[in-house]
């Protein structure tokens, strides 16, 4: 089920109503059933994939906790392998096959790959990573194995964040799901504010930018350098508005149920470096890779060459996590490279200026935005050829006149996003709003409602991160 | 706390009402022009219109060699120079769309003297009902729903309409062709459209050199898929036409259903008398069902000769000038029962 659907606008109030009417001991059943229903609105039979993950990781965690030594490790490896194999089968099977063919031909052998005609289960990368974090924590002894399969299932399935994160840890979300939640007015109020704001960001901002970006990326050679450059910058805003909008609705929906999930974004385009960008963008994924890959690889407590390699490995795998395409790997690698450059030349790139909005800081923010926007090209382009076309059109004037659809709507949408990011800088929309007096708050609600109702995009674009 | 919640809900409703007014004054017309200009046309013309003519592309489509390009509704209007007939057209539209256009007529402002709606036989077939064009058509009608305009606009963004994919619609169409039994009062070897179509596709036309005449085969198959069906009460178009009739009865507006001509000649020569039987039986069903006090079915089914159809290699209700003229004249004569004093015999 999509958050930006009429279906969800009926689903959420019904779930919330039933949730607060039911006694605490029965609420897990409601969350379980409603989450299954939410997921099955996409492709019903894929719910069995989630059940498989739940059963494997639930049993593995119990076995890991009960055993010691090699057996304990064996159970962990079995659990992780099951998750990774599942991910590989659905997401990377065709990618691996396609890459094996040229490899075989290098050795003069024929390899005819079989391409599976399967649709990737929505959000598979999110719930496998979330579930894996649980078994790893149990293995490390930092998390007790959950004995109630219902609570564990809800940790994997919890509908507000199941398909596009944030990737939660069991010690936080698991405990939140178990806690008795009373009907607290402030939770409902804050949750609704976040849902409204999230819908506004997704439907009014991202969906109004999307047609322009699609037009550019579908056929860059038909557009002028200026248009393509604008398209590249606009994609930065589109993907942010799209993913941030989703995460905000997820946060709000959970908050209405009294459940707090983590913030996945902190105004990332106000970062002064790429290093800072990654502490503000898709925070739950960054921290997952940090805890379960970067630190086990040695983190920064190794020699510089090894540390550099660690950074590159982490970023390239993070790219691959997004999609089974070399363009994503390059996207990750470029981020890793820029981060290394920033660290090597930290005296030049990573200095602190106390005055928040000083001219130099604004310059650094712009620099970071331009760099990340350029790197996004590899994320958005279907393949290297397209990315090459985009880059060549930007740098080589092709004498094509500015001929794209009206820019007014996407530019106003972007301006709106920047203004709201200023508004919630180093805070969060609901928290910031609560510092205002009622008439101002209601004026902002009215503005958001009007924009959402009257000015949202009329073409439907699915959330970009659903495909991961 | 309950008092606080009730106050806030009331405030929210009040804000929504105000926002709806603001929307009506600002973006509504722009959205209509972009998504459903027909509603705008109805709104703009209704004060001066005597008769509304609702149609698909049959009304305005012309042939390249036509010296006169007037539409059916315009030619009909020539017979009634004192009246204003306003055509509201949209390609691929059907009764399900026409009934929504009807509700846009503000009767308090000006009541039309009659409504003419095309009755297109093919619009009852599975290919049209499950056409891929249905999704954009349904999208265009979201703004015409009986809710406040601001809510309709939001529903449009949420894509809250019959928004099936092309694949889903095609599946439904194929399912209907495969499973709906054709009913004949005489023995006939093909039970479904699929069987009939398969038989036509397997070398029903052979050229002199012994090879299959694929152009003719394709056209024959297309005729089978377009006309081989029995209209039943359960057909969604029947419900739509019933609603149109009902609206006209309640509001005491005379209704004329302009049953369009089909290429019977080609249906007969390409496929055979069984197909012509089905076409005529469906016509009889509709004429019988809708020839009631307030409604007249204007039967043009067999009035246009095969060569007068614009599309010679496909089934459409697009006519050359002669065809449009014949239909317009027939229609003009039919509406004389209400507008005899305004009638001017031109030809």
Image (tube, coloured by chain):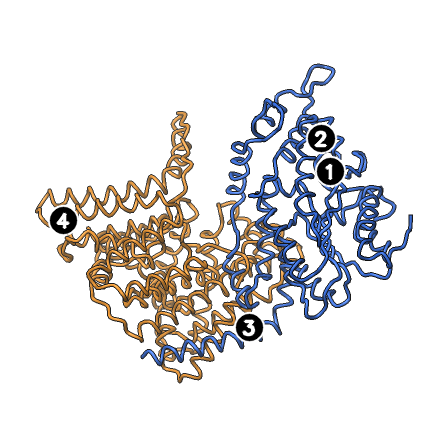
Looking at the picture, how far across and down is residue B136, in whole percent?
Answer: 59, 51
Can residue A332 be seen here? yes
Residue at 32% of width from left, 59% of height from top?
A166
> Do the residues bearing badges 4 and 1 touch, measured as CB atoms within 8 Å?
no
The picture quadrant where one finds residue A335 is bottom left
**Residue identified by numbered label 4:** A62
Judging by the rendered image, the residue that carries numbered circle 2 is: B267
- Local crowd size for mark 1, using a 10 Å CA cut-off: few (<14), some (14–19), many (≥20): many
Q: Which residue is mark 3?
A: B20
**In the image, residue A159 lies at what x, y percent?**
33, 57
Q: Earlier in the sequence, mark 3 or mark 1?
A: 3
Q: Nearer the viewer, residue B140 or B81?
A: B81
Between circles 3 and 2, the one closer to the viewer is: 2
In-image side of A93 versus A65 (left or right): right
| Mark 3 and mark 1: Cα distance apart in space | 46 Å
Instruction: State which chain disc 1 sits on.
Output: B
Q: Which residue is mark 1?
A: B262
Which residue sits at x=53%, y=75%?
B19
State the mark number for residue A377: none
Chain B: give its colour: blue
Chain A tint in image: orange
Q: Are marks 2 and 1 on the same chain?
A: yes
Mark 3 touches mark 4? (CB < 8 Å): no
Alpha carbon of mark 4 to alpha carbon of mark 1: how far? 73 Å
Measured in 3D between alpha carbons, the distance from the residue under mark 2 to the one under mark 1, in whole angstroms, is 9 Å
Label 2, label 4: how far apart the Cα atoms are: 72 Å
Compared to residue A288, the image places residue B291 above or below, namely: above
Label 2: chain?
A: B
Taking the spot 48% from the left edge, 58% from the top edge, the residue there is A374
């Amino acid at each position: 089920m999509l958050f930006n659907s009429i279906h969800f606008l009926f689903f959420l109030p019904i779930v919330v109503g039933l949730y607060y009417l039911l006694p605490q001991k029965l609420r897990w059943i409601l969350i379980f059933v409603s989450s299954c229903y939410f997921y099955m609105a996409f492709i019903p039979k894929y719910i069995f994939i989630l059940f498989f993950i739940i059963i494997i990781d639930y049993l593995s965690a119990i076995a890991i906790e009960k055993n010691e030594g090699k057996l304990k490790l064996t159970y962990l490896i079995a659990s992780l392998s099951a998750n990774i194999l599942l991910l590989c089968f659905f997401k990377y099977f065709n990618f691996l096959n396609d890459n094996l063919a040229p490899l075989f031909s290098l050795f003069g052998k024929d390899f005819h790959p079989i391409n599976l005609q399967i649709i990737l289960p929505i959000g598979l990368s999110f719930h496998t990573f979330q579930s894996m974090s649980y078994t790893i924590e149990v293995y490390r002894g930092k998390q007790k194995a959950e004995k109630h399969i219902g609570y564990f299932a809800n940790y994997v399935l919890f509908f507000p964040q199941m398909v596009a994160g944030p990737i939660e840890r069991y010690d936080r979300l698991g405990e939140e799901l178990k806690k008795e939640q009373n009907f607290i007015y402030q939770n409902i109020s804050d949750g609704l504010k976040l849902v409204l704001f999230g819908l506004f960001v997704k439907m009014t901002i991202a969906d109004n930018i999307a047609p322009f970006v699609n037009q550019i990326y579908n056929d860059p050679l038909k557009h002028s350098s200026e248009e393509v450059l604008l398209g590249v910058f606009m994609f930065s805003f589109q993907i942010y508005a799209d993913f941030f909008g989703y995460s905000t609705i997820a946060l709000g929906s959970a908050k209405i149920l009294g459940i707090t999930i983590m913030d996945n974004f902190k105004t990332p385009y106000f970062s002064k470096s790429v290093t800072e960008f990654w502490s503000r963008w898709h925070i739950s994924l960054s921290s997952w890779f940090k805890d379960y890959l970067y630190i086990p690889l040695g983190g920064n407590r190794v020699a510089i060459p090894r540390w550099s390699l660690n950074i590159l490995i982490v970023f390239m795998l993070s790219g691959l996590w997004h999609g089974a395409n070399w363009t994503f790997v390059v996207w990750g690698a470029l981020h890793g490279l820029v981060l290394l450059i920033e660290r090597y030349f930290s005296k030049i790139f990573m200095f602190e200026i106390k005055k928040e909005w000083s001219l130099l800081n604004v310059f650094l923010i712009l620099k970071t935005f331009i760099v990340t926007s350029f790197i996004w090209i590899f994320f958005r382009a279907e393949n290297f050829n397209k990315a090459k076309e985009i880059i060549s059109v930007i740098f080589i004037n092709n004498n094509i006149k500015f001929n794209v659809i009206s820019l007014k709507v996407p530019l106003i949408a972007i301006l709106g996003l920047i203004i709201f990011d200023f508004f919630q800088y180093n805070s969060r929309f609901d928290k910031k709003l609560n510092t205002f007096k009622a008439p101002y708050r209601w004026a902002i609600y009215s503005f958001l409602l009007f924009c959402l109702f009257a000015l949202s995009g009329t073409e439907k674009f699915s959330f970009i991160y659903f495909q991961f | 706390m309950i008092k606080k919640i009730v106050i806030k809900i009331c405030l929210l409703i009040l804000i929504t009402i105000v926002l709806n007014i603001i929307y009506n004054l600002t973006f509504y017309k722009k959205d209509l022009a972009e998504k459903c200009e027909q509603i705008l046309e109805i709104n703009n013309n209704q004060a001066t219109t005597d008769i509304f003519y609702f149609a698909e592309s049959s009304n305005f489509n012309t042939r390249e060699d036509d010296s006169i390009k007037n539409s059916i509704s315009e030619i009909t209007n020539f017979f009634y120079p004192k009246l204003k007939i306003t055509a509201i057209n949209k390609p691929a539209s059907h009764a399900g769309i026409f009934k929504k256009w009807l509700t846009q007529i503000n009767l308090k402002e000006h009541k039309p003297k009659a409504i003419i709606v095309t009755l297109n036989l093919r619009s009852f077939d599975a290919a049209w009902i499950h056409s891929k064009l249905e999704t954009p058509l349904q999208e265009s009608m979201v703004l015409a729903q009986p809710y406040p305009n601001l809510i309709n606009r939001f529903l449009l963004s949420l894509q809250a309409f019959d928004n099936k994919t092309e694949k889903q619609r095609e599946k439904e169409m194929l399912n209907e062709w495969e499973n709906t039994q054709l009913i004949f009062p005489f023995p006939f070897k093909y039970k479904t459209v699929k069987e009939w179509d398969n038989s036509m596709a397997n070398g029903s036309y052979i050229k002199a050199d012994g090879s299959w005449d694929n152009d003719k085969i394709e056209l024959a198959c297309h005729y089978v898929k377009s006309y081989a069906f029995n209209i039943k009460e359960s057909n969604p178009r029947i419900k739509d036409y019933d609603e149109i009739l009902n609206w006209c009865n309640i509001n005491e507006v005379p209704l004329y259903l302009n049953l369009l001509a089909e290429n019977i000649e080609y249906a007969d020569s390409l496929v055979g008398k069984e197909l012509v039987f089905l076409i005529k039986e469906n016509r009889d069903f509709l004429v019988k069902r809708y020839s009631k006090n307030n409604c007249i079915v204007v039967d043009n089914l067999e009035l246009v000769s095969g060569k007068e159809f614009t599309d010679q290699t496909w089934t459409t209700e697009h006519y050359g000038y002669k065809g449009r003229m014949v239909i317009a004249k027939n229609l003009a004569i039919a509406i004389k029962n209400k507008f005899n004093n305004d009638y001017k015999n031109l030809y």
